[in-house]
Amino acid sequence: QVQLVESGGGLVQPGGSLRLSCAASGSIFSIGAMAWYRQAPGKQRELVAGITSGGITDYADSVKGRFTISRDNAKNTVYLQMASLKPEDTAVYYCSASIRVNLIRRSDYWGQGTQVTVSS
């Protein structure tokens, strides 16, 4: 059984910073791409940033230059460093990972979400 557990959300003032973490645990053979998504009230879930197993990254235009995604493969963990936060960044943030539990079976897993609120 595989689990993704996020941490690091909270309330921050505009212009502030937060770092989200997401750790994968369980019966893991290998982890491929990992990503962060977010969903604001009344809106669809959107991709924020992604990172391949080799460290290639991609970002939504709305967060480029402000957010940085990284991963520690030894810890099965992905991070999202968020800076210059804006009220429109307020959302529930979810991590996702493409995980193999053996050579044959690969599935996409999701964390439970962590709330980020940007407000003065």
Image (cartoon, rainbow, N blue to C red):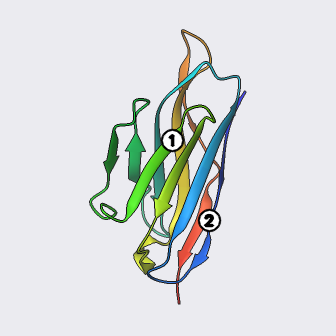
Answer with left or right where residue 111 lies relative to residue 44.
Answer: right
Which numbered circle lies on residue 29?
none
Residue 29 at x, y percent in the picture: 61, 18
**Do the numbered discs 1 and 2 sit on residues whose CB atoms are within 8 Å?**
no
- State the image coordinates of residue 69 (x, y, percent, origin top left): 44, 50
Residue 2 % position (x, y):
68, 30
User: For the residues carrying marks 1 and 2, which lies nearer the camera in this image?
Assistant: 1
Task: Determine crowd level at label 2: few under 14, some 14-19, many 20+ residues with C-alpha closer than 10 A.
Answer: some
Neighbourhood count class around disc 1 (C-alpha, 10 Å): few under 14, some 14–19, many 20 upward: many
Name the residue tied to disc 1.
71
At a point 46% along the width and 44% down the height, the residue shown is 35
Please name whichever residue, 78 or 88, is drawn nearer the observer in this view of the structure. Answer: 78
Q: Which mark is residue 9?
A: 2
How many marks are shown on the rendered structure? 2
Q: Quadrant of residue 117?
A: bottom right
Q: Position of residue 80 (x, y in %)?
A: 49, 55
